[in-house]
Amino acid sequence: MKKSTKLLLLVAILVALAGLWSWLPLTQWIDQLRTWVLSLGILGIVLFVASYVVLTIVLAPVSVLTMTAGLAYGFWGIPLVVVSATLAATCAFLLGRYVARDRVEKWINQDPRLRSLNTVIRDEDWRIVGLMRLSPLIPFGLQNYLFSMSGVRLVPFALATAIGIVPGSALYVYIGILGQTMGDEAGSMKWLFLGVGLITTVFVAWYVGRRASRVLAASNAKQ
């Protein structure tokens, strides 16, 4: 598919979403969801963390959950997501290394691409963890099991994960914050501030991810 066709398709999707947004009572639904989550208090946070751990272990997408954190908790969703994702990654790492090592190793060896990637990271340290967390090329949940087969230790793995996931987490939380704003009587200046912030966050996440992908590709080429 040509780039121009992809761009037109993206524009068409955005226009359709805008029309859907104006037709459906999404503002009311968003406000109700946010109110319900906040009404749970500390239980809501516990359920969020537990859900993040379970979804990560079973390799389910967690991006919607990350946006929900921004929707419900605003900018406080960023540290909540970082803590939840780090805990989830640690649990999956321990599960892959000590509980299901044989099964994970067999699963990786069945896929040539995963086997090749596993060869690259097997003898690497925490720096490769940080780079892969910054790169969007490999799903977050899958990375945890790949690293469980490597020689990286638990504490450096957890610290590199916590630092590396910040740009991506901030991006998805910011999208959730925009949804939260739809439930408020926001003025034009607030929308301008959020829009500029979102564009900046997207650029930073894209730029850092692009640089990380280049470094990973160069590392792979040396193997």
Image (spheres, rainbow, N blue to C red):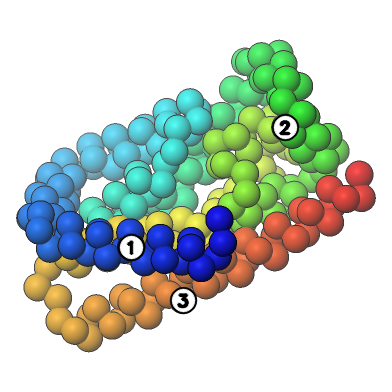
Residue depicted at 48% across the width and 61% down the height: 6
In which quadrant of the rendered image does the C terminus lie?
Answer: top right
- Closer to the camera, 136 or 124? 136
Residue matched to label 2: 114
Quadrant in which the N terminus is drawn? bottom right
Q: Which residue is mark 1?
A: 12
On the picture, is 156 further left or further right than 151?
A: left
Assign a secondary structure to mark 3. Answer: helix
Horizontal and vertical percent position of residue 219:
84, 52
- Do tag 1 and tag 3 residues touch (Cβ < 8 Å)? no
Asked whether residue 138 is in view, the answer is yes
114 or 77: nearer the viewer: 114
**Which residue occupies 61% across, 26% down?**
94
Q: Secondary structure at mark 2?
A: helix
- Residue type pointed to by label 3: Thr
How many numbered circles does the render carry? 3
Residue 165 vs 182, above or below: the answer is above
Can residue 160 be seen here? The reply is no
Q: How far apart, in angstroms, are the residues tagged by discs 2 and 3?
A: 33 Å
